Amino acid sequence: MLTYAAGLLMLTVKLALVLGVLLFVAAYLVWVERKFLARLQVRYGPNRAGIFGLLQPIADSLKMLTKEDTVPEDADRIVFLLAPAVVALTALLMFAVVPFGGTVTVWGREIPMVISDINVGLLYIFALSSLGVYGIALGGWASNSKFALLGGIRGAAQLISYELALGLSLVPVVMLAGSFSLVDIVGAQAVKGPFIYYQPLAFIIFAIAAAAESMRIPFDLPEAENELGAGFHMEYSGMRFGLFFIGEYVHVQVLGALIAVFFLGGWHGPFLPGPVWLLIKILLVSLFMIWMRGTLPRLRYDQLMAIGWKVLIPLALVNIVVTGAFVLI
Amino acid sequence: MEPILNSAPFSPWEPGIFALFAYGAWVLVIVAVLLFISSWLGEKKPSPEKGRAYESGIIPTGTARLRYPVSFYLVAIFFLIFDVEGAYIFSWAVACRQLGWAGWFQILFFIFVLIMGLVYIWRKGGLEWGPQAKS
């Protein structure tokens, strides 16, 4: 019984640490994005709250917490209130299967540095990223605003299109590792070397599909400002808007972590401990996404769908067949 | 002999299903607390102007739940078909070494049929969303 209580305590501490780091990095990713994007556009970015504007995320979250939470008149109240939570929940839950280190020994027992090493980890991630579509589609529909409805429909169509490319591009990774478990995939890369050497095409497909999944420029059609105002979160205010925001930035982090786990060797790296390496890789991927936002124009809707269906999916299918032959040789 | 509580599925020491549910509970609590604090601290001054949907300053007319183009529905159907077939490809991928060349030729045929299906909907115009789309 005592070991059980100690285990519960350790688990609680571990989960609190993981969630704290996730949310902290999400908040400061917003700051990094605003600062870096501003520099790309020859501006200063936030520089009033604290030195270098470092207190800006805290100021923003306090402001969001104290703002009025408005619900439009004819909105579908319950769906409207729950949709942002769905987005934030699915983004946060996706991190549960990402390994962020080996093991640490506390009180003579090994603590694995992963929350849950389920043997269908990859399918779990696909399931959750598909569920995230509901938050956007329902949020857009429930708002009773035409802009929000258009944003929600576009978001749903875009996400399910890129979901396919995302899934199919990872089939070669599963073949190379022989397992769905993310821990095993990282373990296989420790032996064979990062999968980006074996699967550069799959890496490119996954990176493009991941950028589209996170709905950022050049793929931010669901919230295209100059066509739809703010798209699916048009009518949201206060912390519910904040939850969409948290969801987006946690999603960026999780996708960065997934790119690291599937192609860049996960938490393995020289000199530094595992979690630090994973964090460095996540930040590099996030910085790349911000850079992309500063450089590329937004695609047109039909171009966006055409890239997904006419380029990425056929390429991913061919890649699967070719990789299968190579694995068997 | 370990007590039943420390066996794999329920043990908090193992990265198993228990840890997953504990994490899920934590996440739920965090989101609920955020929403609770915001409803507690936030202002509450509803007015008809605030409740009206924002359409760039123009007063909205009619319902916003409009009918939308059928091509969005088609995308959903294509997704369903391809995703189910993706499930077969995944189950082959995880066992591709054991299945050997026989399995490879079978999945080759399967993917060939899948690509033919994609070519068919492409030729039929199901993948056209641009201004020239006939639909």
Image: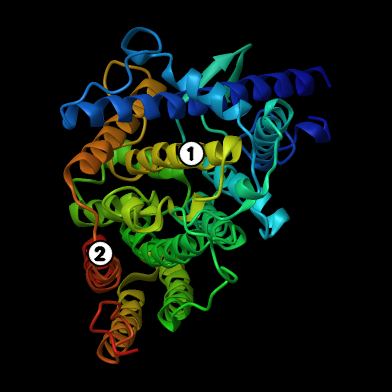
State whether residue A308 is above or below residue A229. below
> On residue A85, which mark appears?
none
Give the crowd class for mark 2: few <14, some 14-19, many >=20 residues within 10 Å: some
Question: What chain is tagged by disc 2?
Answer: A
Count of number-bearing discs: 2
Give the crowd class for mark 1: few <14, some 14-19, many >=20 residues within 10 Å: some
Is residue B7 shown to the viewer in this render?
A: yes
State whether residue A328 is above or below residue B119. above
Residue ID at (31%, 28%)? A34
What distance separates the C-alpha of mark 1 from that of mark 2? 24 Å
State whether residue B91 is above or below residue B40. below
Query: Which of the 4 quarters of the picture holds residue A164?
Result: bottom left
The kind of residue on which mark 2 rests is Arg
Seen from the viewer's position, the closer of residues A101 and A313 is A313
Q: Quadrant of the N terminus of chain A?
A: top right
Seen from the viewer's position, the closer of residues B104 and A20 is A20
> On residue A245, which mark appears?
1
| Disc 2 secondary structure class | loop
> On residue A300, which mark appears?
2
Residue A8 image point, x, y percent? 73, 24
